[in-house]
């Protein structure tokens, strides 16, 4: 997700907490299932950051539900921006549709699913058994 903040502005506890709440609301899950992986300066915009995020889900059916709930294209951006505004944040400047992929994560149980939201994209990834 590309957000119109500097790295310093976004990396405050209040903004990060509000962002996690907004992503969770848009995805139909709880904030504890949203993990901010990184916040980096966007390449083309000095006043924007790319927020790489993962959404945890318990199984493949949950991934399908989250993906459906989030939507794609303009509907996804509108849904996320509505949730961001509700949390008192600025609207995103870039979001793309969820993509399913695979990922390994040693600290996540085998029954967990990871839904990474990276480089202005949502990526859904299933964690391999440990």
Image (spheres, rainbow, N blue to C red):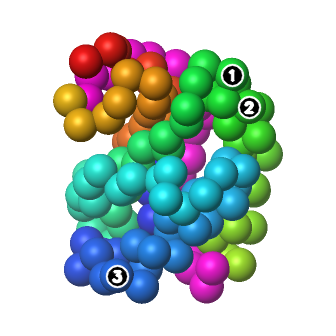
Quarter-of-image position of residue 109: top left
Q: CA distance from mark 3 to mark 2?
A: 29 Å
Q: Is residue 3 left or right of residue 24?
A: left
In this figure, which residue is indicated by the disc labeled 3?
13
Q: Is residue 43 left or right of residue 124?
A: left
Asked if residue 73 can be seen in this view, the reply is no
Q: Which residues are magenta?
A: 87-105
Regarding mark 1 in the picture, which secondary structure is present there? helix
- Disc 1 packing (10 Å; few <14; some 14–19; many ≥20): few
Circles 2 and 1: CB atoms closer than 8 Å: yes
Circles 1 and 3: CB atoms closer than 8 Å: no
Regarding mark 3 in the picture, which secondary structure is present there? helix
Q: Which quadrant does the C terminus fall into?
A: top left
Queried whether the magenta region covers residue 95, the answer comes back as: yes
Q: Position of residue 113 (x, y in %)?
A: 48, 29
Q: Position of residue 36 (x, y in %)?
A: 36, 56
Asked if residue 107 can be seen in this view, the reply is yes
Q: CA distance from mark 1 to mark 3?
A: 32 Å
Residue at 56% in and 79% down: 89
Residue at 63% in and 79% down: 87
């Amino acid at each position: 997700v590309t957000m119109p903040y500097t790295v310093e502005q976004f990396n405050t506890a209040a903004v990060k907490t509000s962002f996690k709440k907004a992503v969770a609301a848009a995805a139909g899950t709880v904030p504890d299932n949203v993990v901010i992986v990184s916040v980096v300066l966007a390449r083309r915009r000095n006043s924007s950051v790319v927020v790489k995020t993962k959404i945890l889900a318990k199984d493949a059916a949950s991934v399908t539900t989250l993906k459906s709930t989030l939507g794609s294209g303009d509907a996804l951006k509108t849904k996320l921006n509505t949730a961001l505004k509700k949390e008192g944040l600025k609207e995103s400047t870039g979001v793309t549709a969820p993509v399913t992929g695979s990922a390994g994560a040693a600290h996540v149980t085998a029954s967990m699913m990871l839904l990474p939201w990276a480089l202005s994209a949502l990526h859904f990834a299933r964690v391999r058994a440990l």
